Amino acid sequence: MARPQQLQVNPLPTTILDRRDVIPLLIEKPDDFLCVGGLAGAAQELTAISNDAPYVYAMAGAMGAATTMALGLALAQPKKRVLCVTGDGELLMNLGALATIALMNPPNLTIICVDNGHYGETGNQDSHTGFGVDLATIAGGCGIPAVLTINTMDDLPEGRRLVREGNGLAFILLRVKEGKPLNNGRLMQPSVGRTRFREHLLGHA
Amino acid sequence: MTTHDVTTGAVAWPDELYDLLRRANVTQFAYVPDAGHRVLIDRSLADPDVHSVALTTEEEGISLLAGADLGGARGVLMMQSSGAGNCINMLSLTKGGRFPLLMLISMRGEFGEGNPWQFPMGQAVKPVLEAMGVIVLTASHPGEVIEVVSAALTMAFQSGEAVAVLLSQRLIGAKKFA
């Protein structure tokens, strides 16, 4: 009977990076950005490395929202650099968003997809990327101009350059091992997150 | 083809509607294309002062406009009624976050519809949006479009509500099927 099979086309290297080590190094200073964190691990990690800062909008639901929410923010705030951190499960739910974002090509947006190949929040089931689906190839096929896959620490300097100095839309696929994200808790009230983000950025709710 | 052509000048409301949205400082126009929104989409594409965002699915627009609000901008999401169902879970973000939202929905599957495929979603638009906390207004005649959308703009951007305006087939014309 049919079931998901490991893809044999262009097999990806085995993941070796620990997200808790590499994400703080890749982002380094989150306060240089306006940040949108997709549900679960990405939101927890942005909250942890920013010490629960108001310039992070961290989600615990609305799966699929992060990338296009960051697009709307980037279009509204062209003088600020916007950082979207999402996961493989969330991105798989809304792949078309990469096509939408590529067509708009906001020069102030970087998307980091933390790809652990699993649905970490719901019991660690394999995701499609765990079977070999390559989100970086999809991002490139959509037309995102700068696409990078980080498999090892050797790839990190180019990733840091794209996040920090990249003057254009960029997509970074950060391939990590299974394992828990950095997590010091996160704001669970979406309306409070909106209010404090806007007060921080705009000076009013 | 619609039963009347909005380019003839006989129907002025689409252009008036675009001007109304611009006066209300709407700067992000997001849409999955539909004939009923042709003038709004074309004018947004031609307007150097707005972002015209073509979506692959309507739910992208819900989160896009929440992001616009985080950045202090206003937007409108345009779709055909068949797209309303694609937005439902994403409206969790709108309601939970108390983000303002303005949707313009060109209706199918109601007044004079000749394609049976359009009825299930067309008839469900109002109840499912209301179930997610969206206030639903309807415009059925050219003379009331500006009044209804003006009300929706106030409700969305002054009061912070999520509001959908249904543009009835009575207004935009039922598509002809042979």
Image (tube, coloured by chain):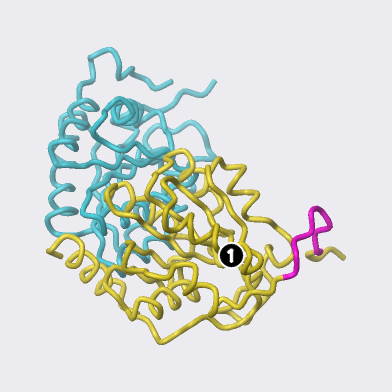
Q: How far across and down, in percent of the image, does residue B73 sit?
A: 22, 50
Q: Note the chain letter of the cyan one.
A: B
Front residue (pair A204, B84): A204
Relative placement, left or right, of B78 versus A137 is left
Asked whether residue A178 is drawn in magenta, I would say no
Secondary structure mainly formed by the magenta segment: loop
Q: Residue at x 30, y 31 (%)?
A: B44
Q: How far across and down, in percent of the image, does residue B88 sit?
A: 42, 59
Residue ID for mark 1: A174
Q: Is residue B141 above or below residue A60?
A: above
Q: To which quarter of the image does residue B21 belong? A: top left
Front residue (pair B32, B120): B32
As drawn, which residue projects farthest toward the top?
A: B8
Front residue (pair B119, B151): B151
Q: Is residue B133 above or below residue A94?
A: below
Identify the image quadrant of the C terminus of chain A. Answer: bottom left
Relative placement, left or right, of A180 versus B152 is right
Q: What span is colored magenta in the figure? A: A5-14
Inspect the image, locate mark 1, and give the three-letter code of the amino acid beneath it.
Leu
Q: What hue represents chain A?
A: yellow
The crowd level at tag 1 (other Cα within 10 Å; few <14, some 14-19, many 20+) is many
